[in-house]
Image (spheres, rainbow, N blue to C red):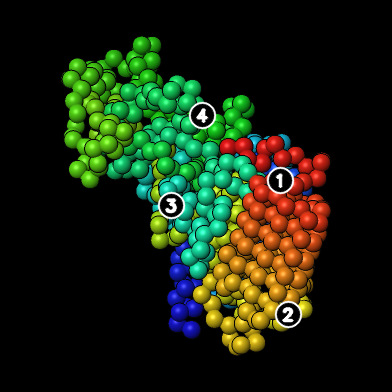
């Protein structure tokens, strides 16, 4: 009881830290890189570990201590999203366990707002701006997968007094080799390899160059790889960036998780700039570019001679001091850190230059007496995700979707959820029916309560790193399921099937003597007898003929587009 009470008090303290924020969850992404599976099902409703992707976002929000969220989705997805939030999310055993451990009975209040399907993120935010009545707004993306450290993010935003704060993580710790191995240590083809099922190269998230102040974590410059490639991967950094106060580093391994905190006035910029339709592609680069505009504003103000002519003018005094310092030679402020290897120094280190920025000079001046001229402080701040929270990445590609399922199946992410679900499987869930003994969701490292619950028998083998729904499942004799396979509800497997490292969605029928390896199988698929499929993608509502032997193939209905499935 003491542990429950302490955890509840911690959540209450966390909740009080978010009181001055409005929270917006964007769940309207069409999933253009996953068209094979998102053309019929909204991306936020794709199953990961037999729960929709939206569940993990809502659960992370509620787990962080937030009590209200505005969920923005598309008109196309509105019906499905509303049904899930109102009828199913609150009945999930993990959510019930979380709420029972809290000292307050207040549940997460979700306000659902629908916007037209063709609106981008900035346009969607404007549609719900009337509900954003606080000074700061927390903007979250439903495809950010993992535990979110929102408390650290909001604290960084307050301390830095930033206009825009973004959560960043290193790509080297994300969808890569970690999680590629099964619990037994085996590795299958495509399991962490350089190509996704279907024979296509893995489509990673859109990547950027970030220039970061290594001391303050301020974001000084952002440029996409695509734009940089047009200039031969050469970056032309503004002089203002080179004059930053601390050592700066050019990063090529950072991933923007699309989790932001911003001042409300930043969103008001969108009203006067209708051409800005995307938060990430339009608004963020605009803010980063305009962080260092004070010098230019003051120069124009001095040229128009609208300032007072007194010798002791605060503005003129700062301006003269700045002009004097500009005459000093630019020098390297310090040598590169000794911790960097020589090749890293050559690639990333950029020397600090003097003199400092004009706004730095004016830091010690009285800014309240600037002749009635108001200057807005624009600061873009980075916040690095803490490694102790585990993996954190965006599920916006086929490969990321596969990796998310495998991490959940192996218990590397959200491992506590399946332990709760397994204990509660007797409540609200039907026992799995099969020709073999009943099976249950199995989590890595978990020991069944009795021999009767053990999922391994003489006729059926399910690896402990696999996840199988406990609702209307039928397995034929001699089936083998291993290597972080996830199987959805209402699935039927014929006898002597071998399934390895696959993601199988709901309502799938697989014939006898089939071998499936490293495949993603959509809903309502029928695979006939004696098929051997390796590294394949099978879209929803598809039928695979008996005796099919294919590798690196995509199966789909003619009316489902696949051209954008692997677009980077």
In this rendering, is residue 149 above or below 458?
above
Mark carried by residue 173: 3
The kind of secondary structure element at disc 1 is strand
Real-space Cα separation, disc 1 to disc 3, in angstroms: 29 Å
Sooner in the amino-acid sequence: mark 1 or mark 4: 4
Q: Nearer the viewer, mark 2 or mark 4?
A: 2
Q: Residues within 10 Å of mark 1 (few under 14, many from 20)?
A: some
Cα separation between marks 2 and 1 = 32 Å
Q: Could you tell me residue 179's position as x and y percent?
A: 50, 59
Number of the front mark, 3 or 2? 2
| Badge 2 or badge 1: first in the primary sequence | 2
**Which residue is depicted at the point 19% across and 29% down?**
332
Residue identifier under label 1: 554
- Under circle 3, the secondary element is helix
Contact (Cβ within 8 Å) of mark 2 with mark 1: no
Position in image of residue 546 (x %, y %): 81, 56
Residue in front for this viewpoint, 75 or 108: 75
Sequence order check, earlier mark of 4 and 3: 3
Mark 2–mark 4 Cα distance, whole angstroms, equals 53 Å
**Image quarter of residue 29:** top right
Residue 274 placement (x, y as % from top left): 62, 27
Q: Which residue is mark 2?
A: 436
Q: Is residue 12 visible?
A: no
Sequence-wise, the earlier of marks 3 and 2 is 3
The reply to whether dot 4 and dot 3 touch (C-beta < 8 Å) is no
- As rendered, which of 120 and 107 lies closer to the eye? 120
Label at residue 226 = 4
């Amino acid at each position: 009881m003491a542990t429950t009470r302490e955890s509840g008090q911690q959540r209450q303290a966390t909740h009080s830290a978010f009181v001055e924020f409005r929270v917006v969850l964007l769940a309207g992404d069409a999933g253009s890189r996953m068209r094979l599976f998102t053309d019929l099902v909204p991306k936020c409703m794709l199953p990961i570990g037999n729960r929709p992707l939206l569940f993990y976002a809502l659960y992370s929000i509620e787990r962080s201590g937030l009590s209200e969220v505005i969920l923005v989705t598309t008109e196309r997805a509105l019906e499905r999203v509303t049904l899930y939030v109102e009828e199913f999310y609150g009945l999930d055993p993990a959510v019930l366990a979380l709420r029972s451990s809290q000292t307050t009975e207040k549940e997460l209040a979700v306000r659902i707002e629908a916007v037209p399907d063709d609106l981008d993120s900035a346009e969607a935010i404007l549609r719900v701006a009337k509900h954003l009545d606080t000074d700061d707004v927390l903007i979250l993306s439903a495809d950010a997968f993992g535990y979110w450290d929102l408390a650290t993010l909001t604290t960084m935003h307050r301390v830095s007094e930033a206009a825009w704060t973004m959560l960043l993580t290193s790509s080297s710790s994300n969808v890569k080799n970690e999680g590629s191995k099964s619990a037994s240590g085996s590795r299958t083809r495509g399991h962490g390899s350089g190509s996704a099922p279907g024979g296509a190269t893995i489509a990673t998230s859109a990547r950027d160059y970030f220039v970061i102040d290594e001391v303050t974590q301020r974001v000084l410059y952002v440029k996409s790889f695509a734009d940089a490639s047009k200039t031969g991967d050469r970056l032309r950094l503004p002089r203002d960036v080179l004059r930053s106060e601390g050592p700066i580093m050019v990063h090529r391994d950072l991933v923007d998780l699309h989790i932001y905190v911003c001042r409300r006035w930043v969103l008001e910029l969108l009203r006067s700039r209708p051409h800005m339709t995307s938060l990430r592609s339009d608004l963020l680069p605009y803010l980063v570019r305009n962080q260092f505009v004070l010098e230019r504003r003051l120069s124009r103000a001095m040229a128009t001679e609208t300032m007072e002519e007194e010798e002791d003018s605060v503005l003129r005094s700062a301006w003269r001091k700045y002009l004097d310092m500009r005459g000093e030679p630019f020098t390297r402020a310090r040598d590169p850190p000794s911790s960097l290897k020589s090749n890293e120094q050559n690639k990333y280190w950029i020397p600090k230059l003097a003199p400092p920025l004009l706004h730095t000079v004016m830091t010690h001046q009285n800014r309240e007496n600037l002749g009635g001229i108001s200057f807005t402080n624009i600061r873009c701040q980075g916040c690095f995700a803490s490694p102790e929270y585990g993996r954190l990445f965006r599920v916006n590609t086929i490969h990321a979707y596969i990796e998310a399922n495998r991490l959940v199946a192996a218990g590397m992410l959200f491992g506590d959820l399946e332990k709760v679900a397994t204990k509660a499987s007797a409540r609200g869930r039907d026992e799995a029916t099969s020709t073999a003994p009943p099976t249950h969701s199995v989590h890595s490292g978990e020991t069944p309560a009795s021999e009767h619950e053990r999922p391994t028998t003489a006729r059926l083998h399910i690896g402990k790193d696999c996840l199988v729904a406990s609702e209307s499942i039928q397995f034929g004799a001699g089936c083998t399921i291993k290597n972080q396979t996830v199987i959805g509800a209402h699935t039927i497997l014929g006898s002597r099937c071998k399934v390895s490292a696959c993601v199988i969605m709901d309502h799938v029928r697989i014939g006898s003597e089939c071998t499936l390896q490293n495949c993603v199988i959509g809903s309502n698929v029928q695979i006939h007898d004696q098929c051997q499929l390796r590294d394949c993608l099978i879209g929803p509502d598809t039928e695979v003929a008996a005796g099919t032997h294919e590798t690196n193939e995509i199966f789909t209905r003619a009316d489902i587009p696949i051209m954008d499935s692997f677009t980077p």
